Image (spheres, grey):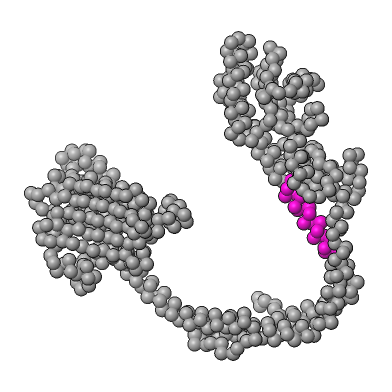
Amino acid sequence: MKKNTTTLTFKILMLLIILVIPLNIVSLIVSTVMIRDARTSIINSVRSTIRTYTDNIDQIIYNTNSTLYELNERDSDFLTLIDGQNDLSYQLSKTGLTKTIRNKQTLSPMADYFYFYQDSLGDLLVIPHNSSSFDDFLYSNNYFDKDQLSHASWHLATIDGTPYLTKISANGSLYYGAFIQLENAVSDIYEYLNYPIKAISFTEEVPSPTASYINDRRAIIISVKCSRAGLYLNLIFDSSILVSSISGWRWFLIGIIILYIILVPLLYRYIRSWVIAPLARLNTAHRQLQSGEENYRITQGSDSAEFEQAYASFNSMAESLQNLRLEKISNELARKQMLLDNLQLQIRPHFLLNTFNLLYSMIQTKKTQPAQEMILYLSQYFRYLFQYNKELELFSKEWELILQYLKVSRFQHPDAFTFQYELDPEINLVRIPPLLLHNFFENILSHALVHGQVVHIMFNGFYDNGTVTFQIADDGQGMSDKDVEIINAGNYEDYSRGFHVGLRNSITRIKYFYNQQGSIHVDSAINEGTIFTITFPYNLEEDTDNESFDGK
C-alpha cells in the first residue's frame, strides 16, 4: 500500500496558515496548555519524589519480612524463645537475639523496632528498647490476641502521635513482629519539596478531597501506593500554585504570536530559500546515489554554512562509498582465506590418527590412568575447538589447554622433553586468537625432538608498556638458515604446496587482530635449537575498562 505523503513546502505553508487563527483562540489554547503542562510537570515531579520514599518503605518491609522469616526458620535463639522455658538459656537467647537483630539493622535498612512476646511467661522483648511507649501500646487493645492476627499484612498504628507500620505474627505462644517509623519520611518530604504542602498522610485507602482532614475540592491529592504494605502515601497541596507563575507571561506570548503572524510571508520566503531548496537538493543527490550513480556529486553552493557542510559531507561520503565497497570486498576475501587457513590447521587428520592410535594402545596395555588423561585432553581440545566462535579468547583458557597437551604428550614421548615457563600476571588477562600458541607447541613436539636426547622447552610471556611478548624456545633440531630467512621475511613462496602454512596463518591472524602491528620473529640454528618471538600491541587498561572477561 502506497504511503500518503505531502511535500515539505505544503506542510510549512499549511503551518503558517494555521497560525492565523483568531488570537483569542490561540491565547486560550496557549493558557490551557501551559496550565496543563505545569500541572502535569508538578504532579509528575511530586509523584516521582513520593515514589522514592514508598520504594524505600517497600524495601524496608521486604528486608524485615526476610529477617522475621529467617529467625522463625533457623535461628536457635528464636527457637529457644518459642519453647518458653524461663531459665538461663532463655535469658541468653534474648541477649543473642538482640545482638543478631542489631547487627542486621546496621547491615541493611529494615524496621526500627522488633518485638517478641512470650505469652506463657508474660515476657516482652523490644529491640531496641529506648521507650516504654511500645510496651504500653503492645499490652493494650488485646494486641496479643490470635483472633486478631494478620500474618501476611502490615497496618497503620499511631503511638504517641507518631505514625508507624506494624506487623504481628505468632509461633506457638510466641508473638513477634516489627514497627517501621513513618515520621522520618514525612519530614524528609517537607524538607525536599519546594511547594506549599497542606498535608502529608499515610492511609489505607485513597483519600477524597471531601475527606474531613482535607475538606477542599480544589486541593490536589497525589497518592502513591506502597505495594508491600498495602497503604498509600498522600501529599495534599492547593491547586493555586499551578497558575501563580503563568499569568504574567500570557500577554507576552500573545504579542509574540501577533508579530509572527505579521512576518509570516517573509518567514515563508526565507524558509523556502534556506531550508526547503537545500533539502530538495540533498534528496535529489541521495536518490541519484541510491539508483547507482556513484559519480554523482553536489556542485551547487548554499547560503547556509550548515548545508554547505552537508553538501561537502555528502560528496565525501559518496567518494568513500566507492573505496569502502572495494575495501570491504578485499577484507572479506582476506578474512575468509584466513579462516580457511586456520580450519586447515585445526582439522589435522594425522594428529587425530596418532592420538587415537596412542589411546588404543594405552587401553590394550591397560594403562588406565594415561588413557583417562588422554580422553580428558581430547574432550577439552574438541570443546575448545567447536566452541571457537569468538575472534579472541583469554590467554588463560588456551594456557590450560597447552598444559594438558604437554601432559598427555609425555605418554607418547616419555623422557623426551622438559618444560619451563615464566609468565607475568597481566598475561592471563590478554586476549589472543584461539589456538595461536597451541600450534607452536605442537610443531616443537612434531619436528624439534631428537631421538635419545632430552629437549628443553621454554615458554615466556611478558607484558610491558602496552606490548605483549611471547617466546617459545627449544634446544632441539633447529632450522636451516634458508627457512629462517623465509619466515622472517614473510615471503612464503612455497605456500601453495602447504609449506609454512601454519606460520603464515599465525602471522596473518596476528596482523589482522592487532591492526597490522604484530610480528613473528625466529632465531634458529641446526642442532642448536629455535626461538620464536611473538610480539603485538595490547592496551590492557582499555580492555579491562570496556570488556568483561566472559568471552562476550
Q: Position of residue 240 (x, y in %)?
A: 88, 54
Q: Residue at x 61, y 14 (%)?
A: 91
Quadrant, the N terminus: bottom right
Q: Foreground: 500 or 128?
A: 128
- On whether residue 44 falls in the magenta region, the answer is yes
Q: Where does residue 175 sit, x and y in percent of width and height?
A: 69, 21
Toward which corner of the image does residue 147 lie, by quadrant? Answer: top right
For residue 426, say whether it is visible: yes
Up/down of 275 relative to 177, above or below: below
> Residue placed at 23% from the left, 55% from the top?
472
The residue furthest top is 87
Question: Does 338 sit above or below residue 154?
Answer: below
Q: Nearer the viewer, residue 221 or 230?
A: 221
Magenta range? 31-50
Q: Residue drawn 83% across and 46% down?
A: 197
Q: Name the quadrant containing residue 5.
A: bottom right
